[in-house]
Image: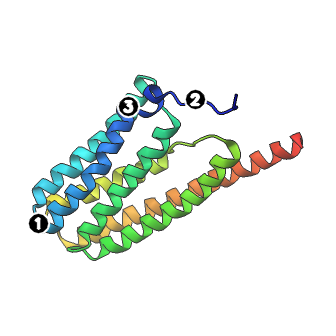
Amino acid sequence: MSGKRKIDWKREVFTIPNILSLFRLLLIPLLVWLYVGRKAYVLSFIVVLVSALTDTFDGMIARKFNMISDIGKMLDPIADKATQAAVLLCLSSRYKIMLYLAILLIVKEVLDGILFLNLNIRTKQVHGAEMHGKVATWALYFTMLLHLLWIEIPPAVTYTLAAICAFLVVLSLVLYAISGLRQLSSQKKQEGSHG
């Protein structure tokens, strides 16, 4: 007999929150086609709004009905950040500043991913999102939705919102780095004491 834990597919994989996260990933090609291919900005707004709402609801459902899983903790932020990056890249065809915001977001997620992958391997636990990350996400969604709907938005509004989002993304990166490094340091101390 191996020591591997058997996966409970119903409770850990095929849950409503995980299905909603997969649904958000499937919306990304539709969004790109609508915005870039069809220039259907109102429909693009509706798609992103649906994605943002499912992002909110999957977390609420997971907590309320005890459907939190390690797979969900990984899948939810992947769907979330992939959607944000796709929307920002689409918007960059009309608003140049969004390209830099997309690059900043991608760099932040890569650095966070490296740190927390290391932490997950060391602690054998998957760590979920923290409040500062959620605040940055809400700010990004607000900015993206506004630019999808308000086609003739004044440049001053665009630059102000982009600056606020950039600040929140950088702040989240710094806070995640501090939290992750502290947890890694604590884990190393525990391993040293047991060794």
Disc 2 secondary structure class: loop
**Real-space Cα distance between discs 1 and 3?**
33 Å
* Residue carrying label 3: 60
Which numbered disc flags the more N-terminal residue, 3 or 2?
2
Label disc, if present, on residue 39 of the rendered structure: 1
- For label 2, the crowd category at 10 Å Cα-Cα, with few meaning under 14, some 14 to 19 and many 20 or more, is few
The three-letter amino acid code for the residue at tag 1 is Lys
Q: What is the C-alpha distance between the residues marked 3 and 2?
A: 27 Å
- Density class for disc 1 (Cα within 10 Å; few <14, some 14-19, many ≥20) is few
Residue bearing the label numbered 2: 6
Q: Is residue 18 left or right of residue 93?
A: right
Q: Amino acid at mark 2?
A: Lys
Q: Is residue 20 above or below residue 120?
A: above
Lower sequence index among marks 2 and 1: 2
Left or right, residue 63 beside residue 56: right
Q: Position of residue 92 (x, y in %)?
A: 26, 72
Q: What's the amino acid at mark 3? A: Met
Q: Mark 3 against mark 2, which lies toward the viewer?
A: 2
Residue at the spot x=34%, y=54% of the render?
Answer: 139
Residue 2: quarter of image = top right
Q: CB under 8 Å between callouts 2 and 1?
A: no
Foreground mark, 2 or 1, reads 2
Quote the CA–CA distance across marks 2 and 1: 47 Å
The answer to which quarter of the image holds residue 175 is bottom right
Q: Secondary structure at mark 1?
A: loop
Location of residue 3 in the rendering, given as x and y in whole percent from the top left corner:
70, 31
Counting the numbered discs, the total is 3
